[in-house]
Image: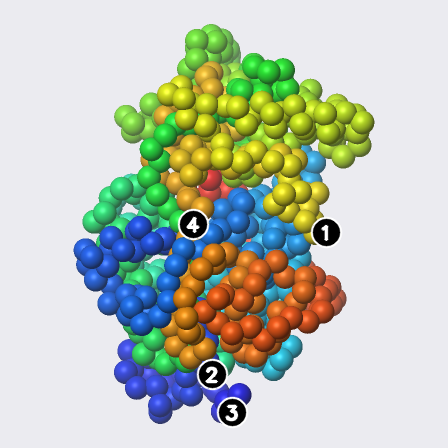
Amino acid sequence: MRSKRDRRHPQGDCNEQSTSADSDGIQTLVIGLDGACLPILESLFEDVGLPHIQSIFDSGVTGALESQIPPWTPSAWPSLYTGVNPGKHGVFSFLDYKGYDWSVVNGTNVHADTLWEHLSRQGITSVVVNVPVTHPPREFNGALIPGYMAPESPRCHPSGLLTDLQDTIGEYRIYPDTTAANATEAVTEYGDVIQMRGDAFCYLVDRFDPDFGFVQFQQTDTIFHEFPGDWEIVRAVYEAVDEQIGRILDKTNPDTVLVVSDHGIGEMNSSGFYVNEFLAEHGYTVVSQGGSGMPSWVPVRESQLRKGDDSTESENSSEDTDLLRRLTAVAARFGLTTHRAGTLLAAVGLRDFVAAHVPGSIVRASNRQVDFPASQAYMRARIECGVRINLEGRDPEGVVPPERYEDVRSDIIDLLREVETPDGKPVFEKVARREKYFDGPDAEEAVDIVTVPTDFDHFLSAELAGQMFADPGQPWNHKRNGVVALAGTGVDGSLSDAHIFDVTPTILSLFDIPKSVEMDGNVFSCVESVGERAYSTRRQDTGDEPTDMVNEPNESNDESIVNRLTALGYLE
């Protein structure tokens, strides 16, 4: 292990070309590219070059990195940096549910030890920047600036680090300050936050002189949700990321470097499938019309949807509201749901105006809703990739007796396995009990039935759209295969059957640390394994965990993040 020197605040910046004077170099560097995959990268290599990323691919070994189920950011990144499946680390979705209550997931929902915590126990220092679901950070040997799912101005480790960072490099943001309405504005904002990652990582390298570094770039995924198919913006984002990677490589001079992603991304070429419409047709889901209904998992906040309040409305306003409510309820019976109306309003630029002026009661009147307590089964949220059984004794108002659970589950599995699109293509490549994909202390938090769309080319939706099939809800969406590239010391041979669970065991092996027998992954075929050992991967509460969010109450954090997730199409 390299010796450490006393590090204070950095002198100079990340543009320095020589590292010999100010750093021993990093032993292992991980670069995370959210949503990256070989088809996208190979196209960009041919188109614009991306010299720094391509140099890693050209000098090392590369391959597809199979993601987990579900292949979404908040669940997949914890799987990557813990080496265990969601049944062991506890994060399945963007939201954490307790009955009908929910909260946005954060680092406290990750119940498994992280890679940098395993390294810390061996005296190894790490610098971690912008990795999702790491807020609030836990104690370890090194420094961490949280990423996606954290609030702006997040708690960092060590305490006070964010202030020091901002004093040195200036403004630091997790999220771009843009509505994505203007492409030029978006490219500028994307470029700004991408540069902030590079600046922050280089600052921390100077200050902490780490053995291990992990920096993640989120905009390589965001771009496909906000500007799907706009290759000019895609190129601009990847070129900005490539520039920062070049700076980081020059600064850190790593012995070994890995490029990894949490999932792939690609165009949707098939249909959207409305799972709750299908379940309702077969008698498992109960649908109500209008009224207050049961909870939507994306909350309707009256304060955002209207101006004023019922108690101050004039008599004429009240009459107008009643008329509008009746009209929208009639429209809903003819298929004009709030989902379809929203799409039309957005197309003509009126969605924000209507949201600001139309009372929430009108929105609800036009919306067919799943009656969760009355249903035997339902899809709670599309991002869960599955169906829940409303089990008596487990769910708040469960209706399926425990002795009927397996029969109901088997019947729904059989029905879903046979579903085909209108042109005769199977909607699902796998429909299975959750036990096939999840095991561990948190496995019972998963859906009861896992639904894996064929090639992830079918858009699953939990909404009620008046029909079972429609155009995909998004033109681009996540794919199962991400990407991995390794180059440098300790990398030899070929790479095959790489899985997202393998990343943590592989990095531990590069540090001569055996993987835990509890980990679900194995060491990549191109890296020599140092074996495995029996030690716990389960997070141990030490009593020194942070108990509050700095400067921001949780409700405010949740609302802001939910709005971002909804804008990106993750929440309906």
Q: Could you tell me how far apart the alpha carbons at marks 1 and 4 are, in whole angstroms?
A: 27 Å
Q: Which residue is mark 4?
A: 481
- Above-or-below relation of 22 to 552: below
- The residue under the point 50% across, 42% down is 562
- The residue under the point 69% across, 20% down is 374
Q: Which residue is mark 1?
A: 441
- In this view, the residue in front, 500 or 347, is 500
Q: Find out whether the residues at labels 3 and 1 contact each other: C-beta distance under 8 Å.
A: no
Q: Which residue is mark 2?
A: 209
Label 4 environment density (alpha carbons within 10 Å; few <14, some 14–19, many ≥20): many
Q: Is residue 37 left or right of residue 370?
A: left
What number is the disc on residue 3?
3
Label 1 environment density (alpha carbons within 10 Å; few <14, some 14–19, many ≥20): some
- In this view, the residue in front, 98 or 262, is 262
Q: Find out whether the residues at labels 2 and 3 contact each other: C-beta distance under 8 Å.
A: no
Label 2 environment density (alpha carbons within 10 Å; few <14, some 14–19, many ≥20): many
**Foreground disc of the pair 2, 4:** 4
